[in-house]
Amino acid sequence: MAKKVYPANHAHPRYWGTWLAIALMKASAFLPWRLKLAVGRGIGLLSWRLAKRRRHITDTNLALCFPEWDSDKREEMVKRTFVANGIGILETATGWCRNPEHLRQRIAFRGIEHMERARAQGKGVLVIGIHFSTLDLGGALHSLFFPADVVYRPHDNPVFENFMTRARRDIFGAAIDRHDLRGVVRRIKSGHVVWYSPDQDFGRDASVFAPFFGVEAATLKLTAKIARMTGAPVMPFMFHRNPDDRTYTLEYLPAFENFPSDDEIADATLVNAFIEQAIRRHPEQYLWLHRRFKTRPPGEPSVY
């Protein structure tokens, strides 16, 4: 599929919808909390009804990862996933457009001592984050306690890319293109904490196959490669919205031991095991709408 070509003039009518979306995100960041949740739930339920393709992807992912669930439980979890991700849009707007200080009293941050121990080594730190619906708000809340850079995928739409990158640079020390390996390594070697999320499928060339909820999944080799190139400790980081829908928990676990090893599959399996552990706490908040099992081992058909 050919890549979309966008006009150079950011005032072009093609961008009017983007500018409207940005304005709505900025406005929604300042809604009262209950209204923010209600709007997010509404977006999620509407998407659940209309986005049949994404609903199918979500259902397929859950069927593969939780084969013990019956169809009724899985259907309910699909719906809850769309609702959580709808709320996530409002959470993202809040993280990008509003000072996170107003949420400090709603945060429980556990395992701070693990990060302090890792930073004390003076080698920089690689943080393993996860694509929960709370991803960008989690980054904003994290910034209240520890400075960090972030590795991200640039958006194709240049107007939205400028908005998103500017917002993330207000939250993080630097926003680094995921293709800029030298930039990542340079920041870590300079003693920075860099946040990286390796839980998506970027194809066969960048990955090895490792179990994820018992299913062979294309898993990025870059996590171990960065750790090997920098000597930095690799810190697992969990974050989620609590069941009261008003508070958040952020938690560092101890740095991975004996990582990286000389076995790429073992390293990828260790990373996936941590991600599984985090997802099982609040499975509805994970980005199941992504085709996590898009790339299959040789000879296996598509699951979607």
Image (cartoon, rainbow, N blue to C red):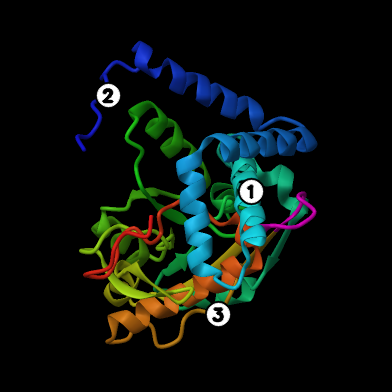
Q: Residue at x 21, y 38 (%)?
A: 1
- Which is nearer the eye, 1 or 267? 1
The numbered mark at residue 34 is: none
Instruction: Give the SS element for disc 3.
Output: loop
Please give the residue where the numbered disc 1 appears in the rendered image.
Answer: 79
- Which is nearer the eye, 76 or 28? 76
**Magenta stretch: dominant SS?**
loop
Type of the residue with mark 2: Tyr
Type of the residue with mark 3: Pro
- Mark 2 or 1, closer to the camera: 1
Please give the residue where the numbered disc 3 appears in the rendered image.
Answer: 254
Q: Earlier in the sequence, mark 1 or mark 3?
A: 1
Please give the residue where the numbered disc 2 appears in the rendered image.
Answer: 6
Outermost residue toward the front in this view: 71
- Which is nearer the eye, 227 or 205? 205
Please report the bounds of the magenta region as a residue range: 240-248
- Placement of 148 over or under 126, stated as above or below: above
Q: Are marks 3 and 2 in contact (CB under 8 Å)?
A: no
